[in-house]
Image (cartoon, rainbow, N blue to C red):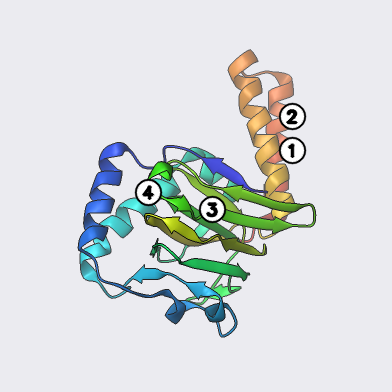
């Protein structure tokens, strides 16, 4: 399941993040790729050891984890340290799958939080590959797309401007993506039922089923 979530960062928060990144040191992104992915990875990443970025890393992580839709769709247990990437003209990231383990953490869900306004650059779409073809994303600044870390995906070549993004990975309480989707749909329907009808017998039964499915599937 891919899910798009808008307005994860406010306009002021975006300004702060972009200002900090304008002062940051960017290095070759291939340094953090696996032996095969580095052959197709051509971008720049903010240096991980740059302490000046600690504040915005914390800000972005807090906003992502506090987002209600993200919590319902992803069921996050742990979040990896965020990477800030920059693609300039001629840069791209070819087809790859994210590492299953990062910093000793299993990766279940990947996400890209767009930081540049889409009109400020050409190209740079995130394409998630599937059996029925590709689904592409080029979102407003402050919006993110979350998707299964098991997916092949790529970033198309930037032909004008610069694409800034924050990228992260999540270990979920619910490992299986099909189960996460079922829980998300059930929880969404339950909340809509409550908003429409209040606490009813049907709401209680759906809530019981959701809670018991979580008990069956959660890895705590």
Q: Left or right: 116 with respect to 24? A: right
Which residue occupies 62% across, 15% down? Answer: 196
For the residues labelled 3 and 1, the Cα–Cα distance comes to 39 Å
Asked whether disc 3 touches disc 1, contact meaning CB atoms under 8 Å apart, the reply is no
For the residues labelled 4 and 2, the Cα–Cα distance comes to 44 Å
State the residue position of label 1.
209
Q: Height in image: 213 above or below 199?
A: below
For the residues labelled 4 and 1, the Cα–Cα distance comes to 41 Å
Mark number for residue 125? Answer: 3
Asked whether disc 4 touches disc 2, contact meaning CB atoms under 8 Å apart, the reply is no
For the residues labelled 1 and 2, the Cα–Cα distance comes to 6 Å
The quarter of the displayed image where residue 202 is located: top right
Q: Secondary structure at mark 2?
A: helix
Which residue occupies 58% across, 74% down? Answer: 99
Mark number for residue 116? Answer: 4
Asked whether disc 1 touches disc 2, contact meaning CB atoms under 8 Å apart, the reply is yes
Q: Nearer the viewer, residue 17 or 210?
A: 17
Q: Nearer the viewer, residue 47 or 105?
A: 47
């Amino acid at each position: 399941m891919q899910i798009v979530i808008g307005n994860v960062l406010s306009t002021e928060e975006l300004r702060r993040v972009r200002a900090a990144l304008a002062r940051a040191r960017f290095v070759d992104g291939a340094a953090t790729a696996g032996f095969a992915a580095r052959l197709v990875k051509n971008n720049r990443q903010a240096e991980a050891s740059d302490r000046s970025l600690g504040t915005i890393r914390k800000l972005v992580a807090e906003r992502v984890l506090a987002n209600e839709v993200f919590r319902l769709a992803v069921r996050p247990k742990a979040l990896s340290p965020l990477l800030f990437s920059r693609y300039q003209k001629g840069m791209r990231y070819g087809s790859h799958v994210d590492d299953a383990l990062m910093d000793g953490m299993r990766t279940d869900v990947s996400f890209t939080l767009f930081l540049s306004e889409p009109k400020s650059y050409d190209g740079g779409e995130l394409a998630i590959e599937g059996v029925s073809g590709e689904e592409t994303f080029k979102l407003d600044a402050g919006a993110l797309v979350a998707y299964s870390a098991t997916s092949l995906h790529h970033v198309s070549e930037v032909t004008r401007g610069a694409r800034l993004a924050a990228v992260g990975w999540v270990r979920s309480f619910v490992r299986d993506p099909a189960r996460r989707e079922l829980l998300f749909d059930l929880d969404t329907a339950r909340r809509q039922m409550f908003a429409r009808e209040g606490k009813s017998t049907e709401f209680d039964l759906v809530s019981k089923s959701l809670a018991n499915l979580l008990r069956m599937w959660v890895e705590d």
